[in-house]
Every structure is written in structure tokens, then in C-alpha cells.
Image (spheres, coloured by chain):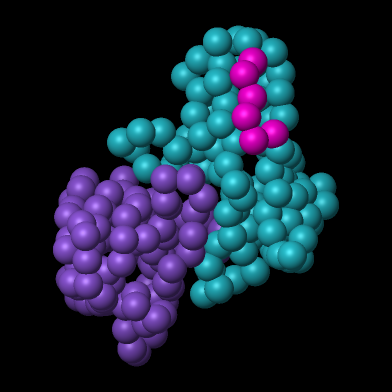
Chain colours: A purple, B cyan
Amino acid sequence: AQKITQTQPGMFVQEKEAVTLDCTYDTSDPSYGLFWYKQPSSGEMIFLIYQGSYDQQNATEGRYSLNFQKARKSANLVISASQLGDSAMYFCALERGSQGNLIFGKGTKLSVKP
Amino acid sequence: EAQVTQNPRYLITVTGKKLTVTCSQNMNHEYMSWYRQDPGLGLRQIYYSMNVEVTDKGDVPEGYKVSRKEKRNFPLILESPSPNQTSLYFCASSFRGTYGYTFGSGTRLTVV
């Protein structure tokens, strides 16, 4: 069965430092997608970055990059130069099989310290 | 503005009283889905739809119904709500996964 795991319930990082949020997944589908979402305290879900299983390069979007290690089935999010506004819940998600079908991890609460 | 619109934002209802949470998107997206978010459990998928008249169960479909009669709308129906359906609900849509899923603002439902 498909599964996605975020092992860090909470993390702290100093402002301006980089931080890595862990995500591992399990799927038997040869084609799949991996997503990261940010949920600030206001509650909205903000799409950050996407990685396809056949993509040759790791995805990057501004200060966000995805460290995709297919053999290890991990898709860690790296946030460079953390800002106070990065404090939020972060969710990793797996698009399994047919599109539209997402499974989410339980999330990591990131707190950025000034 | 491209968006997913959910209504209502907040709802308090009583056990057993049928309700519908509406979801509409103006981006001509094919894929739409519903999730519930509970503390410590993340988001769990209730139902998803790949196109008009094509829907399938997610991980927690019990007690919910959906329909997709038009591409833009994907309502979530609770025929007989119970207190364990108290949760934060999100609707989402996507043209293709690579572009990410756009989420609505959420509906906080309380069943007493």
C-alpha cells in the first residue's frame, strides 16, 4: 500500500540558516509525483514544489529545493536562508497512480527563531 | 482570479441534519478532490474525481458522498453527519499534477 512518512513532528531553525524537512514514501507505481505544501497558521494550503518520479534533476523553486533520492524513496525539502515567515506546518504528499489521488504525510511544524 | 471557492467557511450543525459543502473552481481543471484535516493526522483524502461523472473513493469515504456533474463543481455531501465528522475540510483541483494542486480556503465543520 502507498504510504508517506514525515518523521519530524516539529523542528526549530535559526533565521537565515538552511533547514531540511524529511519525507519518505512507499509506492509500487512506476510513475508518481511528490509535492510539498506549506500551511501557515492562517490555514491555507500553499503549493511549494513538485518532483516527478522520472525527472532527472531535483526540483528547485526559489529558496525551496527537493532532495530526491529515488532508490531511498526519500523526497526531502530543503529551505535555504530561512525567514520568520517560513514558520508553518509543512506537508509532503504523494500522487499515487491516477492523477487527483493524493496521500499526505502528517506534517512537520517548522519554527524559525530570530 | 484563478481560485477554488469553498462554501461555507464555517458551519455548525446538529447530528443527522443533511448538509452540502460546495466547491467550485474557475480554472477548467479536470482533477478535483476532497480532504479532511484533523490534528496529528494530516490531510486524509475523502473522494477524488478525474473528470465529469468520474469519481473514486479516497482513504476515508465513509459517511460522505460526492458528485461531479459539471467540470467546475464538486460538492461534498454529508447525508447524516455525526460528531466524528467534525473537522477542517479542503477541496482541491489540478490541471495536471506537475502544476500542483490549488486548494480552497477550507471549511471548518462542527457537528454537535
- Main secondary structure along the magenta-highlighted residues: strand
Where residue B53 appears, as percent x and y from the top left, is 76, 50
- Viewer-proximal residue among A1 and B66: B66
- Viewer-proximal residue among A48 and B56: A48
In the image, residue B66 lies in the stretch drawn in magenta: no
Where residue B12 appears, as percent x and y from the top left, is 62, 19
Where residue B105 appears, as percent x and y from the top left, is 60, 47
User: Which residue occupies 22% across, 72% down?
Assistant: A16
Task: Pick out the residue farthest to the right.
Answer: B70
User: Which residue occupies 41% across, 58% down?
Assistant: A38
In the image, is A26 to the left or to the right of A12? right
What span is colored magenta in the figure?
B8-13
Looking at the rendered structure, the number of numbered marks drawn on it comes to 0
Quadrant containing the N terminus of chain B is: bottom right
In the image, is A33 to the left or to the right of A99? left
Q: Is residue A105 visible?
A: no
> Image height check: is B53 above or below B81?
below
